[in-house]
Image (tube, helix red, strand yellow):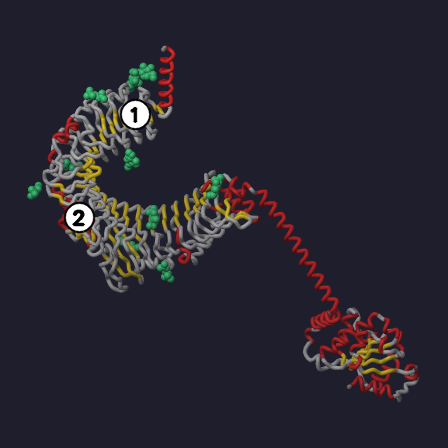
């Protein structure tokens, strides 16, 4: 028995231990936060620390909350029981929670019977109660009656149910939200029960279709009214509700997202719009109400127009009547005006150049000066924020715009208006800090467009075709006067490169630069010139890798300026191959802050898609691949070079004579280039006589005597006519070129001489070049054809061959009777 008890106690202990380990408790000062949410509890756990002040039991499965579930938790002030499928709460369930001020029961299965009348008897200090997203079909009036301290209540909004005594007793109620809300009618009696409450904030995201003008009159303390998401009521009707609040001080009126009927629009008559001035309201939000027209005169009729500080009209379809915008200037306290995103075209009138045209946007006057129209816009003089983005400007160009009264404007959003050129200036914006001109087509750009904004700090210019507009701005004039510019967004402008001087005035001011979605293939700026830049966005460009010099500059920049530099590089065209080994290393090792955990996709060495982290881990593999690649390259180059040399030498050998001839020929031309003309016609010599020294006696004797002295021909003899100081080869080639004929005096000795063959070859080439027979062979010795050089044998039939016999050979006394001489003469002069 005793043993059993011990086992029982121990097991209880273990269970509670394991349960308690499911919740986490955090203590900060006097606050003890115990988090048991989403732990799968089926009962309220027993061992919650008794000093807990904040208890979260949401997202469990607690269909029944039993009596005394929270006893001992005296210090709990906030209890969260939402989303726990609660359908029954016992009478004494919250007994002991004496300090409970906030109870969240939203998103359960509670109905009128789930809450016993006395369930909150002990929770007299409850101030916040959330019963929304439950199944109430009647309001739990009896329960509410006890909650005299309740300040904030969220509960289902039930259609056709009047608010009874329960609500009447919520004397301290300041916030009431219906969620979900299926209330369709708001009439003069609906809020009677709240006459004596303090209700300041009322939220009616319902299904309202019908409202009565006096419905809000009982709400004497109302400060903030939110009637949004009622899909079947026009804002023009809702505005009439303000009749019940005439002359009251209201902080905000929020009529957003009403009237979602397709193919229908809402027209606000001047009398309706002026209701916004029947009350003294600071902020009005009319976002998305399908308003197509606001009738002129509405602002003029507003009684408390000096109260309005913030007006939001965005996401409507305001198109036709626009003079309401002219009247805005009367809203002297207006600080914030947002009329962005008008689905339809606001500017329809085409501007004719040389005429005054007042019907365009909120123009109060135009002036035609220096060939360009200047528009004068008058703004409410306290305006600080103006959002006219996406109001549908299309097909018109920018003009000079002079904003008067805009001394306080510091943020102007003009994005999404497709001005077809940027040939205009903005004037009158002395304090503007932020301008958004995204989507202008600045292919045609006046470089002074934004020059007159001395305090500009942020320039957002996305998709503005600046690559075209700035291509000739070599001096950086576009940004030159903007010395305080800290943030520039030039993303999606098609930039491939920058002009060097683009940011010349921003080197000491620029903090962030967004160049994403351009077409840069290299690191686009000289970072070392900047000194305050902290963030550069290069996402979605076409960079393959950073060069060594860029990486070095980045390292130096970060070190020298002691800046924690952030570089965004995701979505580029990185490669992880032999060229980028240094880059892949740098990515992992640099102190520069990078995005995407430095894990960018890249084209790997085998052309597959990998990541830079992968490549870094396999760096050795890449390096080895690259090494073998280098060797392969070297081998290939060597083989190619060898083959080339080999082929060249074979060819050169085969055509060595031709090459040699041409070489000498060209050299000759080069040497004689001035005397080029006419040397084909006039020969200096009748013949060049090639002979060897052994035959000199005969040549210089009889031959010269006969041809020169007797017949007056001019011969070229190497002994006599070769120019000194010239190469023999050049002399020979000159001689051949300058002579009409070449006489080869062939003897055994001549054939042995080294020049013999050369002279023969050159003469032969010249013969081919000129296509004429110019070779005369004189055989001094008895030689058969077969003894002749091969090259001579080949052309034997084109050669005049003269044989010399004994008598001629030993001609002593100038007897030239022999036929040989006559034939020689003929052969030479022919
Ligand atoms: C709170 O719990 C602690 C132990 O967890 C216990 O010692 C203490 O007596 C409890 N205090 C009260 C008021 O129950
Ligand atoms: C509850 O809070 C009070 C004062 O903050 C403190 O004195 C008391 O010890 C707490 N009770 C428990 C059970 O911790
Ligand atoms: C819870 O307490 C109420 C009121 O004391 C009592 O009527 C009810 O029977 C109790 N429930 C259970 C399950 O004991
Ligand atoms: C409401 O509670 C159910 C479970 O009871 C849960 O599945 C659902 O996500 C909750 N809804 C919200 C909006 O919290
Ligand atoms: C509602 O009250 C307003 C004035 O507060 C009154 O003009 C109007 O006639 C009333 N409507 C109905 C239906 O009683
Ligand atoms: C509204 O506020 C102004 C100034 O704050 C105050 O003078 C005036 O009495 C207030 N009107 C009402 C109805 O409370
Ligand atoms: C802009 O308008 C103001 C006031 O009308 C005028 O003083 C100023 O000279 C104008 N500026 C330019 C550049 O036209
Ligand atoms: C500027 O306009 C673009 C285009 O609409 C938008 O994406 C961006 O958020 C705007 N930036 C600011 C700071 O208003
Ligand atoms: C921008 O303007 C240029 C020149 O005016 C024109 O050629 C180009 O088509 C325009 N681009 C767009 C997208 O409208
Ligand atoms: C890098 O990215 C790849 C693919 O997105 C992923 O599989 C890998 O786990 C990442 N590595 C690291 C270290 O984050």
Q: Nearer the viewer, mark 2 or mark 1?
A: 1
Q: Which residue is under mark 2? A: 234
Q: Position of residue 540 (x, y in %)?
A: 44, 49
Residue 705 placement, left or right of 290: right
Question: Which of these two is toward me, 727 or 163?
Answer: 163
Residue 535 placement, left or right of 223: right
Q: Residue at x 73, y 78 (%)?
A: 768
Residue 662 placement, left or right of 724: left
Q: Is residue 307 visible?
A: yes
User: The N terminus lies in which quarter of the figure?
Assistant: top left
Cβ atoms at labels 2 and 1 below 8 Å apart: no
* Element under disc 2: loop
Q: Residue at x 23, y 23 (%)?
A: 93
Q: Name above or below for residue 505 compared with residue 423.
A: above
Can you tell which quarter of the image residue 356 is in? bottom left
Q: Residue at x 69, y 76 (%)?
A: 675
Residue 158 placement, left or right of 367: left
Q: Position of residue 194 (x, y in %)?
A: 13, 33
Q: Would you say the beta carbon of the disc 2 residue lies within 8 angstroms of ligand 5?
A: no
Q: How many angstroms separate mark 2 from mark 1 (CA)?
A: 48 Å
Q: Is residue 592 visible?
A: no
Q: Position of residue 674 (x, y in %)?
A: 68, 74
Q: Which residue is under mark 1? A: 43
Q: Position of residue 818 (x, y in %)?
A: 89, 88
Q: Name the residue at the front extreme.
A: 1
Q: Classify mark 1: residues with Cα within 10 Å, few (<14), some (14-19) or many (20+).
A: some
Which of the marked residues, 2 or 1, is nearer the chain's N terminus?
1
Question: Which of these two is toward me, 570 or 564?
Answer: 570
Question: Which of these two is toward me, 379 or 437?
Answer: 437
* Element under disc 1: loop
């Amino acid at each position: 028995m005793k043993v059993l008890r011990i086992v029982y106690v121990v097991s209880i202990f273990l269970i509670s231990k394991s349960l308690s380990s499911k919740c986490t408790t955090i203590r900060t000062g006097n606050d003890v936060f115990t988090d048991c949410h989403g732990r799968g509890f089926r009962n309220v756990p027993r061992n919650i620390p008794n000093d807990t002040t904040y208890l979260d039991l949401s997202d469990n499965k607690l269909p029944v909350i039993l009596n005394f579930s929270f006893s001992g938790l005296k210090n709990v002030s906030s209890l969260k029981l939402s989303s726990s499928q609660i359908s029954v709460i016992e009478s004494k369930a919250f007994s002991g929670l004496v300090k409970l001020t906030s109870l969240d029961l939203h998103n359960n299965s509670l109905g009128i019977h789930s809450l016993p009348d006395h369930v909150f008897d002990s929770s007299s200090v409850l101030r916040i109660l959330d019963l929304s997203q439950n199944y109430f079909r009647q309001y739990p009036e009896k329960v509410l009656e006890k909650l005299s301290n309740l300040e904030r209540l969220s509960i289902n909004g039930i259609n056709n149910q009047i608010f009874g005594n329960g609500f009447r007793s919520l004397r301290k109620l300041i916030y009431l939200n219906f969620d979900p809300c299926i209330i369709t009618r708001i009439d003069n009696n609906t809020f009677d029960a709240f006459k004596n409450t303090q209700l300041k904030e009322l939220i009616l995201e319902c299904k309202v279709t019908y409202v009565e003008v006096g419905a809000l009159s009982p709400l004497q303390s109302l400060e903030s009214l939110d009637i949004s998401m009622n899909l079947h009521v026009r804002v023009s009707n809702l505005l009439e509700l303000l009749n019940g609040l005439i002359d009251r001080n209201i902080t905000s009126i929020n009529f957003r997202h009403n009237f979602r009927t397709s193919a229908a629009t809402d027209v606000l008559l001047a009398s309706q719009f002026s209701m916004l001035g029947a009350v003294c309201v600071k902020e009005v939000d009319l976002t998305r109400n399908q308003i197509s027209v606001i009738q002129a005169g509405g602002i003029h009729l507003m009684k408390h127009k000096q109260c309005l500080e913030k007006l939001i009209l965005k996401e409507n379809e305001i198109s036709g009547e626009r003079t309401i915008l002219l009247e805005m200037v009367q809203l002297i306290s207006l600080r914030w005006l947002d009329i962005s995103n008008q689905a339809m075209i606001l500017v329809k009138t085409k501007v004719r150049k040389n005429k005054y045209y007042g019907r365009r946007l909120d123009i109060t006057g135009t002036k035609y000066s220096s060939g360009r129209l200047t528009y004068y816009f008058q703004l409410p003089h306290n305006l600080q924020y103006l959002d006219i983005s996406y109001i549908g400007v299309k097909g018109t160009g920018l003009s000079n715009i002079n904003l008067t009264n805009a001394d306080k404007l510091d943020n102007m959003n003009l994005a999404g208006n497709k001005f077809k050129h940027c040939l205009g200036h903005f004037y009158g914006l002395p304090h503007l800090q932020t301008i958004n001109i995204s989507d202008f087509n600045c292919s045609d750009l006046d470089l002074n467009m934004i020059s007159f904004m001395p305090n500009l700090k942020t320039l957002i210019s996305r998709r503005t075709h600046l690559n075209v507009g700035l291509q000739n701005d070599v001096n950086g004039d576009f940004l030159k006067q903007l010395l305080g510019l800290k943030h520039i967004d030039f993303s999606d402008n098609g930039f491939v490169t920058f002009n060097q001087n683009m940011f010349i005035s921003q080197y000491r001011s620029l903090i962030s630069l967004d160049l994403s979605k351009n077409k840069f293939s290299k690191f686009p700026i000289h970072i070392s010139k900047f000194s305050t830049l902290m963030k550069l966005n290069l996402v979605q460009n076409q960079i393959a890798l950073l060069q060594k010099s860029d990486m070095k500059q980045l390292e130096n920049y970060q070190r020298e300026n002691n800046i924690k530099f952030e570089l965004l590089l995701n979505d580029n065209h990185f490669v992880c191959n032999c060229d980028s080994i240094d880059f892949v290393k740098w990515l992992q090792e640099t102190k520069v802050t990078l995005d995407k955990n430095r894990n960018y996709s890249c084209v790997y060495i085998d052309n597959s898609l990998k990541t830079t982290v992968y490549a870094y881990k396999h760096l050795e593999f890449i390096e080895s691949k690259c090494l073998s690649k280098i060797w392969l390259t070297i081998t290939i180059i060597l083989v190619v070079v060898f083959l080339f040399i080999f082929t060249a030498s074979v060819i050169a050998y085969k055509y060595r004579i031709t090459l040699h001839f041409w070489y000498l020929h060209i050299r000759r031309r080069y040497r004689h280039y001035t005397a080029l003309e006419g040397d084909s016609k006039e020969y200096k010599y009748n013949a060049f006589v090639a002979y060897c020294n052994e035959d000199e006696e005969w040549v210089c004797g009889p031959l010269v005597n006969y041809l020169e002295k007797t017949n007056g021909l001019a011969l070229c003899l190497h002994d006599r006519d070769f120019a000194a100081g010239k190469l023999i080869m050049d002399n020979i080639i000159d001689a051949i070129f300058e002579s009409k004929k070449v006489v080869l005096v062939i003897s055994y000795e001549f054939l042995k001489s080294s020049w013999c063959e050369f002279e023969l070859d050159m003469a032969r080439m010249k013969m081919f070049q000129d296509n004429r027979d110019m070779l005369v062979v004189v055989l001094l010795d008895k030689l058969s054809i077969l003894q002749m050089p091969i090259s001579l044998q080949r052309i034997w039939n084109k050669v005049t061959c003269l044989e010399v016999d004994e008598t001629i050979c030993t001609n002593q006394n100038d007897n030239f009777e022999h036929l040989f001489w006559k034939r020689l003469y003929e052969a030479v002069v022919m």
